[in-house]
Amino acid sequence: MTIKLIATDLDGTFLRNDRTFDVARFNRLLDQMEDQDVKMVVATGNKVEQTLHYFKETPTNRLTYISSNGAMVSDTTGILYKRPVSKEQIKKVLDWNTQTRAKMENLIVLSGIKAAYVSNHATPEMIQAVEQFYPKVIQVEKFLEIEDDILVMELLWPENADIKYFVQVLRKKFGEELHTTGSGFGSVSILAANTNKETGLEALSRIWGIKPEEMVAFGDNSNDLEMLRYVGHPFVMPNAAEFMKERISQQAKADNENDGVLETIEMLLADQSQD
């Protein structure tokens, strides 16, 4: 098989549970990928600024980023593709949340290109929690007056909340108008319609002229499913939930704690070098 692009999710997939990875090993693989003309893509729900932090010891000009669950694609030259949520759609979600707030306490985070935004009513503890995932957090009086492209609306519930239930409720409410997915960290991500990691790969397919059957992808959670189903060579992590293994049969060579993505990439590149 011919591989021209490898994409990987981060949390629970490429990164260990302490959010580290074998930097030296990965950098050696990037050298091999460059020799074989294979593109490396990081596909994550994180903002690109947070993603860059993980790769501060890696030549970033060798990486392309599908960030905010597919709402933006970028590299060191700038933004290649973006798909923001409209103000009208933001208002609809805010109205829905206000009407149902009595039944479910949550925190709203609007993730934009410039920063992440939370309400002035957010407590210091809430902001501290959000800052773990967003490098720049700004409190605002009115969400609809933000001057930024909002890529993702995040609704964060307590850890014991039934996120799958909220995803189903929001999908029923907004149908095809918005894309709703669970993040796996007690939050629901709401994006523009037809926006996910697959659409980010589709954009790169158009830009680079790479076919889906020439792509490899790694993932562990429901927000990876569209991407995994799009590529010719999908790998689910052994540490993924059972429902993911039922949908994607091929597993990486090891789990995220044991560098399963790197292990599998080494195997794929070795096989390709012998063709």
Image: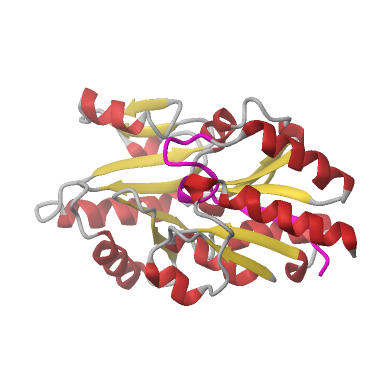
**Magenta residues, as a range?**
1-20
**Which residue is drawn at the image coordinates 67% and 68% (left, top)?**
233
Q: Is residue 136 above or below residue 253?
A: above
Residue 80 screen position, x and y as percent = 71, 45
Is residue 152 visible to the viewer in this orientation of the structure?
yes
Residue 268 screen position, x and y as percent = 74, 59
Is residue 82 visible to the viewer in this orientation of the structure?
no
Residue 109 screen position, x and y as percent = 35, 40
The quadrant where residue 232 appears: bottom right
- Picture quarter with the N terminus: bottom right
Q: Is residue 155 above or below residue 172?
A: above
In this view, the residue in front, 238 or 126, is 238
Residue 211 screen position, x and y as percent = 78, 67
In this view, the residue in front, 125 or 145, is 125
Q: Is residue 272 magenta?
A: no
In this view, the residue in front, 207 or 144, is 207
Say left or right for 147 vs 130.
right
**Which residue is drawn at the image coordinates 48% and 41% (left, top)?**
16
